[in-house]
Amino acid sequence: MLINSDSGIMVEYNGKRIALDPKNATDADLVFVSHAHTDHMHRSSDIGKVLASKETLRIAEARGFKYHNASHEPHPMFEMIDSGHVLGSKALLIDDRILYTGDICTRDRAFLKGARLPRCDILIIESTYGRKHFRFPRIDDVIHRANMLIAEMYSKGLPVILMGYPLGKAQIITSLFRHWKPLYIHESVARMNSIYRELGIDLGDDDARVYSIKDSDSLKHGPWLMIAPKQGNNSTFVKAMKKHHNAITIAFTGWALTHWHSRFHDYTLPLSDHCDFYELVQVVNACKPNKIYTFHGFAEEFASHLREMGYDAEALGSKCSILDYV
Ligand SMILES: [Zn+2]
Ligand SMILES: [Zn+2]
């Protein structure tokens, strides 16, 4: 049974209502928070019993999402499985039958291992890049391309700002490009890096300096590298960096493969924390589900591709749905 609802994806199983990454209030028996990106979390601290990894709960708290009734303890009916998207991100396996991926990436990147998901009966899978157009290059090729670009800018005496989402991508690029000196970490990235460190991830940025907007005069002249939150060339921050330092921006995102994205930054490189289309298909083939629901991004297109492959697949509407299983 499929019923539209405002509160995200809801699974009814054995008389229990399980809300998956709800953004609005729900009457669920259990709320599962797959990871600490803000589009997967609910602002209210009183949303009932929350299940999430200990890393997700810590990062969520640092971002102002503190849940009163949260647990990361193992449960016989609910198994949390690494989803390889950001630190602490999990997929949820309900009673060995229903698998919800949350956001997922199957590639190893720096300190993060790609996801390996089990077989299941019903698969609820994200489809952010669920269109054939999205085939990401090898990570090593992207790293090589970035290092060549940085070297070229250094040889011209120009500083470089590497950009990614402050939670997840920014820590990957800190780890991958920390060998460039002098290294600055933008304060909002530094806050998240220090939580990663507290959670046992060594990003190797101990000798980096934290860049604070209040203290913008502290930047050296000549080439340097900064890790900063992703923002366009018309933002106040980037405008100032270009005016005073001739800085060059390189953004890391899967959307680099679209034409429209490249105009926001000097360079965009396709490094993603999600599966590309072909990796999503691999996940589906490995899970061998009897029924598939797709959500996020190209949900309709991905479901229709899976149907062509012979799967029973359908897209969940943007308002999301209640899935009822006995
Ligand atoms: Zn995410
Ligand atoms: Zn997401």
Image: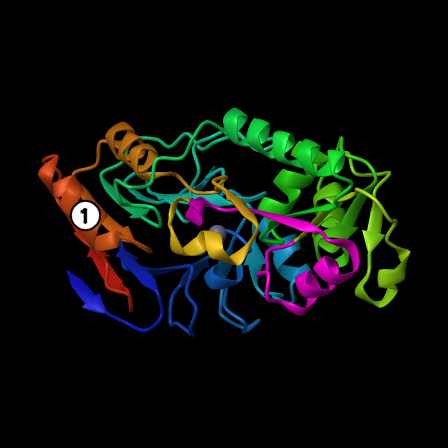
Beta carbon at label 1 within 8 Å of ligand 2: no
* In front of the other: 67 or 91: 91
Residue at 21 percent across and 36 percent down: it is 289
**Number of marks in the rendered image:** 1
Point out the residue furthest to the front here.
Answer: 156
Name the quarter where the N terminus is drawn: bottom left
Q: Which residue is mark 1?
A: 303
* In front of the other: 259 or 46: 259
Residue 153, by quadrant, is: top right
Secondary element at tag 1:
helix
Residue at 27 percent across and 71 percent down: it is 5
Residue at 86 percent across and 38 percent down: it is 207
Residue 174 higher or lower than 33, as above or below: above
* Drawn side of residue 185 relative to residue 149, left or right: right
Q: Where's residue 290, x and y in %?
A: 16, 38
Q: Where's residue 78, x and y in %?
A: 41, 45
Residue 57 higher or lower than 25, as above or below: above
Question: In the image, which residues are magenta?
Answer: 229-256
* In front of the other: 210 or 106: 210
Q: Residues within 10 Å of mark 1 (few under 14, many from 20)?
A: many
The amino acid type of the residue labelled 1 equals Ala
Q: Where's residue 188, x and y in %?
A: 72, 58
Residue at 58 percent across and 30 percent down: it is 143
From where the camera sits, is residue 193 visible? yes
Task: Say if the magenta span includes residue 222.
Answer: no
* Drawn side of residue 202 relative to residue 15, left or right: right
From where the camera sits, is residue 75 visible? no
Q: Where's residue 76, x and y in %?
A: 42, 41
Colouring style: rainbow
